[in-house]
Amino acid sequence: MCEDVSRDHPPPLLEAPAAGCCAPAPAGLGPEQAAALARTFKALADPARVRLLSIIAAAPDGDACVCDLTEPVGLSQPTVSHHMKLLVEAGLVTREQRGRWAHYAVAPAARDALQGAVAAVLPTA
């Protein structure tokens, strides 16, 4: 027959950690900076937009007509224009109207902004 010894020996109590045992958490991003970064990441949250940005960045003359962006991503011109509008609003590309067609270029500060965004979220030690 088994004997119940739990009544004789209660389980040990866990001790509460001493106050101040851990270093305070770093402040991290402020609310405004986090919101700005979220907008940038949201603009890149669609694979088509990431591809469009990379196609423009790789263009030999540094810009691309919307008419040349539809085939590589397999989307209609209105859909590509919608994606490009979001990239412009995020400050990642610039838009220049040339006659009937819009031409896009990577915004001058886009590379630094994207590298800074990653560094702000994941700083190196």
Image: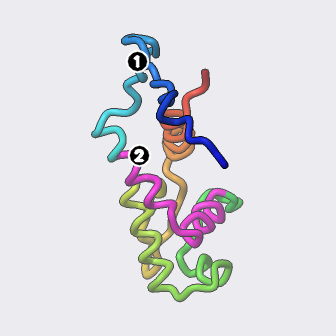
Q: Amino acid at mark 2?
A: Leu
**x%, y% of residue 19?**
37, 12
**x%, y% of residue 77?**
50, 85
Residue 96 falls in image quadrant: bottom left
Residue at screen point 36% across, 42% down: 34
In the image, residue 10 sits, relative to residue 58, either above or below, namely above
Residue most toward the front?
1
Is residue 40 rendered magenta in the image? yes
**x%, y% of residue 85?**
40, 69
Q: Amino acid at mark 1?
A: Pro
Is residue 119 rendered magenta in the image? no
Q: Which residues are magenta?
A: 36-57
Residue at screen point 40% across, 56% down: 90
Per the picture, the main secondary structure of the magenta-coloured stretch is helix
Residue 111, numbered label? none
Of badges 2 and 1, the one in the foreground is: 1
In the image, residue 53 sits, relative to residue 65, either above or below, namely above
Name the foreground residue: 52 vs 31: 31
Residue most toward the left?
32
Element at badge 1? Answer: loop
In the image, residue 86 sits, relative to residue 123, either above or below, namely below
Residue at screen point 44% across, 19% down: 15
Query: What residue would you read off at disc 2?
Result: 37
The C terminus sits in image quarter: top right
